[in-house]
Amino acid sequence: MRVTHIKLDAFMVKIARTHKVEAGCDDCAKLSARLIDALMAGPVEERELLDILHHLLMCVPCAQEFQMLDDCARMDAEDSWPSLDEMWRKIEQGK
Ligand SMILES: [Zn+2]
């Protein structure tokens, strides 16, 4: 048990350290629009944007926000915005 505990601590420290060099929530908010554009254009290769993608995998609030932005961007691109009734239904469901 003791060994596991120490290992776990080391793991947490490693995550905390890694997190510093990776994108944070602020970067995520700043770059999400650019990331969406890049994703729609093709595979993402920019290091900066890949960091954001990585952040989205680990950060639930950012991932949820990104999903919403992404949905909007797609509807914009396809010109397939839902009717006002549908939008209200979605908002009601989201509560
Ligand atoms: Zn985040």
Image (cartoon, helix red, strand yellow):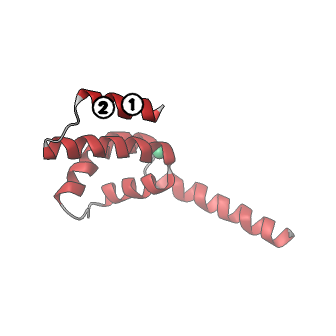
- In depth, the one of 68 and 49 nearer the eye is 68
- The residue shown at (36%, 46%) is 67
Query: Mark 2 sits on what residue?
Result: 87
Q: Residues within 10 Å of mark 1 (few under 14, many from 20)?
A: few
Residue 85, position as x, y percentages in the image = 28, 28
Q: Residues within 10 Å of mark 2 (few under 14, many from 20)?
A: few
- The residue shown at (25%, 27%) is 84
Query: Mark 1 sits on what residue?
Result: 91
- In depth, the one of 46 and 34 nearer the eye is 34
**20 with respect to 33 (left or right):** right
The CA distance from mark 2 to mark 1 is: 6 Å
Residue 21, position as x, y percentages in the image = 47, 55
Whether the residues at callouts 2 and 1 have beta carbons within 8 Å, the answer is yes
User: Is 85 rendered above or below residue 62?
Assistant: above
User: Is 68 rendered above or below residue 87?
Assistant: below
User: Is 42 rendered above or below residue 30?
Assistant: below
Under tag 2, what secondary structure? helix
Residue 19, position as x, y percentages in the image = 52, 54
The quadrant of the image that shows the N terminus is bottom right
Residue 64, position as x, y percentages in the image = 43, 44
